[in-house]
Image (spheres, grey):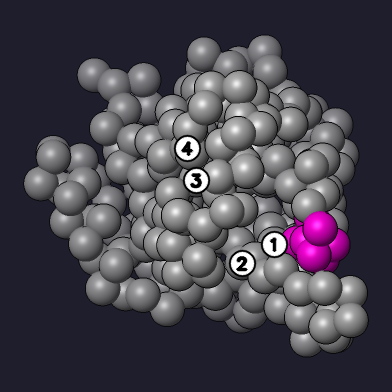
Amino acid sequence: MGKLSGKVAVVTGASKGIGASIAEHLAAEGASVVVNYASSKSGADTVVDRITKAGGKAVAIGGSVAEPAEITKLIDETRKAYGKIDILVNNAGVFDFAPIEAITPEHFHAQFNVNVLGLLLTTQAALPLFPAEGGSVINISSVVATLAPAQGAVYSATKGAVDTITQSLSKELGARKIRVNSVSPGMVVTEGAISKGFIGSPFEAKAVEETPLGRTGQPDDIAAAVVFFATDDSRWVTGQIVKVSGGAR
């Protein structure tokens, strides 16, 4: 039996990249997993297929965390499928870099609505499904919260907010035996990083040069840390922000 047998995990933004790897790792430890997606049903179905073929349990449930009504639908369908939530991984996120001259209200809200407000509202909606014995909320942040690269003012601000929210909610939810922690990846090879042109670019080369372990991360690197926070191995850990970044900080 895995360390998460009998547990239910919801992973937002799990149709690809880091979210997909997290979903698969949680399922491998025995959790029944909700693979949430905003637009790529086919991607989520592929993740579910990989999990079930490996002997795990998973369902794909659509819903953008930028839309409150869709968050409600996600949680309602999770209740119908599994009856509870023990683990919530707030992974869904968007990023866009722009110089100060190019920042617009649309640029700002597109990132804050998903990365910050979506995280808050998803957590709020999920809380009634947590059992009396508590559980774990894991927020996916980023080293940009402290690295604060040029042209990343808005994105970095969203992740700084995620870290502050993590610490605040850990104090608020501790009495309910719900632990809240944050995992902050460095640069990771994902579909998004590839499509934005970061992988194979001078930006990546500079990031690797400044990373003590000397490489770009992989989704599995992040998923392993999330599994730690999801299991009882971290039963005495809350309010922590852990950089999983090869030493970049």
Q: Which amino acid, by three-letter code, is at mark 4?
A: Gly
Residue 169 visible, this orientation: no
- Magenta-drawn segment: 150-156
Is there CB contact under 8 Å for labels 1 and 2? Answer: yes
Mark 3 — residue?
Answer: 188
Q: Which badge, 2 or 3, comes first in the chain's sequence?
A: 2
Which badge, 4 or 2, is on the more N-terminal residue? 2
Label 2 vs label 3: CA separation? 14 Å
**Which amino acid does the dot numbered 2 rest on?**
Val
* Nearest the eye: 146 or 141: 146
Screen quadrant of the N terminus = top left
With respect to residue 20, does 71 lie above or below? below
Mark 1–mark 3 Cα distance, whole angstroms, equals: 17 Å
Magenta highlight on residue 154:
yes
Pointers 3 and 4 in contact (C-beta within 8 Å): yes
Q: Which residue is mark 4?
A: 217
- Give the residue pinned by disc 1: 115
Residue 112 position within the rendered picture, expressed as x and y whole percent measured from the top left? 77, 69
Which mark is in front, 1 or 2?
2
**At label 3, which amino acid type do we have?**
Val
User: Taking 39 as reference, is 213 left or right?
Assistant: right
Q: Is there CB contact under 8 Å for labels 4 and 1? A: no
Mark 3 crowd level (few <14, some 14–19, many ≥20, 10 Å Cα)? many
